[in-house]
Image (cartoon, rainbow, N blue to C red):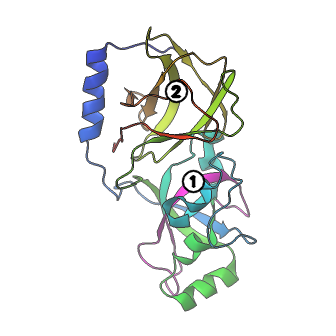
Amino acid sequence: MAVSLWSPLSLVATLLLMLTLAGAQTSSDPFIHSRAAYYPNSDEQGTDRGACGFGSFGATINGGDVSAASDLYRNGVGCGACYQVKCTNMAYCSDKGVTVVITDSGSGDRTDFILSRRAFGRMAQTTDAAASLFSLGVVDIDYRRVSCSYPNKNITIKIDENSNYPNYLAFVIWYQQGRKDITAVQLCETQNFGCKLLDRSYGAVWTTTSPPSGPLSLRMLFSGADEDDQSWVVPINNIPQDWKAGDTYDTGVQVNS
């Protein structure tokens, strides 16, 4: 992918635009019909071994309302995307359903979603209705993508525990609001602005060997459904020069588009 470096003024303008866009929690997109199952051997929340690479964060994000996805996983691009999922059996299911975050890859019997037990039960009208849904195991659903929302949270960088300072850097991105996908990430030296394009190792894990030295800044490419709907966002805060495996760093920015 060809990546162009914008002037500081253009980057600031883009950042301000994205920060001022209102992020609706509902969607005007039409619902798509499919099927959903649930993790049969899990606890109420998700798994800390999901294919997105979120670790324990992937089990507890969004209160544990998470899901594995088949086609919607999109080789990791779909990690962190939010969907409204509602079952269609009027005897048991609520009109609202549940909003889930994609944290894993998986498929069942013609399913697009394998929900956490918590999320699966929250599609129901009542506790008794939830028990009936669990007994069915797989249910018909309607779903659509919606905006993610993490109040009072900025986009956060979690350095993967397998990182090895200063030779190998891997990280995942937490708390991404909105409805866009992060499709490219650059890692830049803050002193001379030299940047390198990172690799998506798997899921939501971005990696590089021989990372630049010194304090590091990120540039993240947010892409919408329209191929022309792309914007680079530059965090306010840098990754410190002495970054450590397992640490988290607040970027100081959030997006709502």
Find residue 66 and report its image quarter: bottom right
Rendering coords of residue 223 (x, y %) = 44, 33
> Residue 94: within the magenta?
yes
Residue 233 located within the stretch drawn in magenta = no
Disc nearer the start of the sequence (2/1)? 1
Q: In the rendered image of this protein, does residue 230 appear above or below residue 7? A: below
Which one is in front, 252 or 51?
Answer: 252
Q: Residue furthest front?
A: 242
Residue at figure coordinates x 60%, y 55% from the top left = 58
- Front residue (pair 131, 164): 164
Direction from residue 121 to residue 20 in the image, left or right: left
Task: Identify the residue position indicated by label 1 in the image.
Answer: 102
Q: Is residue 230 above or below residue 9?
A: below
Q: Is residue 243 left or right of residue 6?
A: right
- Assign a secondary structure to mark 2: strand
Of the residues shown, which amino acid type is indicated by label 2? Val
Say what amino acid the circle numbered 1 marks. Answer: Ile
Q: Is residue 10 above or below residue 97?
A: above
Which residues lie in the magenta part?
85-111
Tell me where residue 146 appears, x and y as whole percent: 41, 54
SS class of the residue under badge 1? strand
Dot 2 surroundings within 10 Å: few (below 14), some, or many (20 or more)? many
* Location of mark 2 (residue): 185
- Residue visible at 58% across and 54% down? 57
Residue at image location 62% in from the left, 81% down from the top: 133
The residue lying at 44 percent from left, 16 percent from top is 190
Q: Find out whether the residues at labels 2 and 1 contact each other: C-beta distance under 8 Å.
A: no
Among the 4 quarters of the image, the one containing residue 64: bottom right
Looking at the picture, tell me which residue is in the foreground, 160 or 51. Answer: 160
